Image (cartoon, coloured by chain):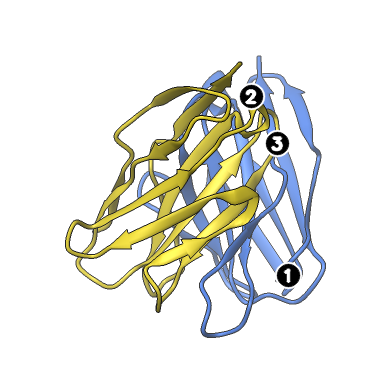
Amino acid sequence: SAVISQKPSRDICQRGTSLTIQCQVDSQVTMMFWYRQQPGQSLTLIATANQGSEATYESGFVIDKFPISRPNLTFSTLTVSNMSPEDSSIYLCSVVAGGPSYNEQFFGPGTRLTVL
Amino acid sequence: AQSVTQLDSQVPVFEEAPVELRCNYSSSVSVYLFWYVQYPNQGLQLLLKYLSGSTLVKGINGFEAEFNKSQTSFHLRKPSVHISDTAEYFCAITGTASKLTFGTGTRLQVTL
């Protein structure tokens, strides 16, 4: 398994500003992802955070809006840029752990973002 | 492309009654299947997973699920629910890329 922490746990931000969310894992992991959960909805994958290279974004998400860094195998950041109220969501990071024969994902506790 | 359908957005049930939460999926490749639970104001916790082998999978908190390949279903069951089971339940699938595709969730509301 993997223990994941996220900072901040929640924040209230003004329109037009940016927020950087940190994700820390207690062990080295190959695959790390960022998801968004809009109010009352399911989770949507934003991107795969690749160590040492640019993130791989899903359809509808772009690097200018959601820049992602992954400097090593235990840490990643997601920035929500030029925020609007529509960005109010819970942002979760997840990792795949358990060895090459498993595809089990573990999730962080999430960052609850409110944009005014 | 992959998709997950959770047929019930809400399921009300009395305490100690049995419950089934339905999940159907669509995929052109073999998939792994998961059920996650999200308690109010908390993150996601893995309930159980199907990777291979026996189609009946047992998870935490007394939950189990059965993988039915012919019906492309992975329904979640519990023979007797408790108030503390009140939560949002998400069915999810993943192929070889490990990227999870989630269903829209089922809100389980357990009352006395």
Q: Badge 3 is on which residue?
A: B42
User: Looking at the image, is mark 2 or mark 3 nearer the viewer?
Assistant: 3
Residue located at (65% from left, 20% from top): A115
State which tag comes first along the sequence, 2 or 1.
2
Q: Is residue B95 above or below residue A113?
A: below
Q: In the structure shown, which secondary structural element does the residue marked by tag 3 occupy?
A: loop
Q: Colour of chain B?
A: yellow
- Between the residue at mark 2 and the residue at mark 1, the CA separation in whole angstroms equals 27 Å
Numbered mark located on residue B12 in the image: none
Q: In the structure shown, which secondary structural element does the residue marked by tag 2 occupy?
A: loop
Q: Chain of mark 1?
A: A
Q: Chain of mark 3?
A: B
| Image marks 2 and 3: residues in contact by CB distance under 8 Å | no
Identify which residue, A16 or A13, lies in the foreground. A13
Numbered mark located on residue A71 in the image: 1
Residue B80 on image: x %, y % = 54, 37
The 10 Å Cα crowd at callout 2, few under 14, some 14 to 19, many 20 or more, is few
Residue A54 on image: x %, y % = 55, 67
Q: Badge 2 is on which residue?
A: A16
Residue B26 on image: x %, y % = 22, 56
For the C terminus of chain B, the image quarter is: top right
The 10 Å Cα crowd at callout 1, few under 14, some 14 to 19, many 20 or more, is some
